[in-house]
Image (tube, rainbow, N blue to C red):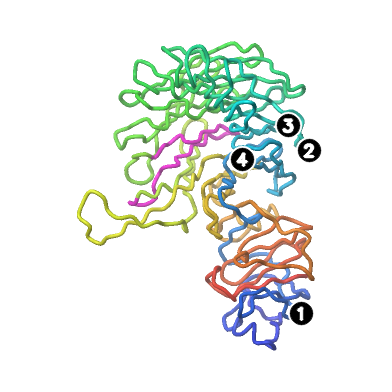
Amino acid sequence: AQSTSGTSAPSDTDGIIGDLYTQEAVVVDDLITVPSTIYEKDINNNWTVDEPATFIADVSTVSSNISLEKTLSQSDIHFGKSIDSDNHIIIGAFNVAYILDNDSNILFTLNNPGLSETFGYSVAISGDRCIVGSYDENDEYASSGKAYIFDVTDGSLLHTLNNPNNYNTSFGDEFGYTVDISSTYAIVGAPREDNTDGSDSGNVYIFDIISGNLLHTLDNPNTYGSGTGDKFGHQVSISNNKIIVGAYGEGDAGGNESGKAYIFDAITGNLLHTLDNPTAYGISDKDNFGRRVNILGNLAIVSAIYEDESTGNSSGKAYVFDVTSGSLLITLDNPNTYGTSYNDRFGSMVKIINNYIIVGAEGEDTTNTYDQKGYVYIFDLNGNLLHTIINPNDVDHHEIRESYGGSYGGSTYHYTKNDNFGNAVTILNNKLYIGASDEDPIDESSSSGRVYIYDIIEGRKLSFNELLNNNTSTIESQIISSLSVAKEYTDASIDNLVIPEGDSVNVVQSLPTPTLAYFKKAVYVIDDTSEYVCVANTVDPLSDGDCFWLQR
């Protein structure tokens, strides 16, 4: 690595810069310097323009930890709540969804056509069509739900799918709670729709994606007793004209909410197979088999996230079935990477994609404390574990609680918040995208959410340079790359660029919006198309007065 020789730091003529350069400011390779203008905080914490200087424009490698955020964050956005991919990627957040290309650049923002903030809770994409669910949208009844089909090539709205409301009123049906799409069909679940067999029995609807017309209604088969609370349609998935539907609330002889899943023919709407809970451990009471389902080709996966095992209650399991025969092929036990498996909820996300089976365990702990950081496990199609991915967010919020059930001895207990790491995943071009929809980003916006990007083959996080340049980088494998969402700077220029307090560690989406990137402990750099660069001379990215902005 080279130091800053060949670059010149600005003179300290106004007393604002002070001793910023008492440390080595930059540790990089292959420096490229350009004329720049410096923005920095004065003693009143206002951003000001100092004077021109020559500084860094680009580097090939950086020895530092990185966290890339495409846009600034807002509270309760839950970015990464839902993710899917085909030739493009779609990422859902509350009240918005984003279409990205395979280089992780945002192409279109799909704004909510309605009023419910649950728009984006569920998303799916196939070819040049995508679907976004908004399960809490109202019609004449509250929380009836809607779904929307968009054109991926230009972001335009093609169809609004209203709740068909086949039974009685549509109050609280939650149509759009789950969605999926193929080249021919759009599938929408209404898991709390009431029918003649009971309240919250659930229904699923099949639409034509070209016309938006309703083709079939899949009624809850209700193979065991009453349909009340079955929540048929809580999860749906389609592949090769076969649809799998979860009904996690359905009971059987093993207990209430044992759960079931059903496979249908999308062309005819006929039921092909009923998948019963295999109940691999003890009774099946409240296993919630069918809470998560997914299908690809001739394989279907169903999880039972509250299934118990010998190492703990609600450990969770996942089961892989043959779609043609309906027979059980593989039982995926919770790998239980750390300690007991109590409340790990292995199976909180399941997906079969490319040649991989991916299972999330949103409640799994990383230490002896009940931190519920979350894990993601990657298996091959034979059920062999390939990679274990641990939530990389080591800087989470803590709260202090007193000890219950004993005398007050003055001790404090620290708990980390559940980030929902692994709540949604997809793969495109060997990049694994993992959502952590409840993660709080650096600026501490509650549940803003984040999406992490990994190399699926190696099971490691991708570096910033790899994402930008699509090549093999020498950057340390511990570097984190992530996406975060919310407000953006627009139409900023040398004359009107204002960096608000506390925003110095965030990134704004690509040109013509200024592009800013933060590199911990000394350096801000981006690729050669960028207009703005930020440099910091501090180990602590949140300390005041040690970060300033450069414009080419």
**Vertical order, 271 against 397 (above or below):** above
- Magenta residues, as a range? 344-369
Q: CA–CA distance between discs 1 and 4? A: 45 Å
User: Which of label 1 and label 4 is nearer to you?
Assistant: 4
User: Which of label 3 and label 4 is nearer to you?
Assistant: 4
Task: Tell me, yes or no, whether the highlighted magenta stretch contains residue 432.
Answer: no
Q: Which residue is mark 2?
A: 153
Q: Secondary structure at mark 3?
A: strand
Q: CA–CA distance between discs 3 and 2? A: 8 Å
Residue at 33% x, 45% y is 339
Q: Earlier in the sequence, mark 1 or mark 2?
A: 1
Judge by depth and name the residue closer to the eye, 177 or 38.
177
Q: Which residue is mark 1?
A: 52
Q: CA–CA distance between discs 4 and 2? A: 24 Å
The percent coordinates of residue 296 (x first, y second) are: 59, 26
Residue at 68% x, 87% y is 14
Evaluate whether residue 296 shows in this view.
Answer: no
Q: Which residue is mark 3?
A: 129
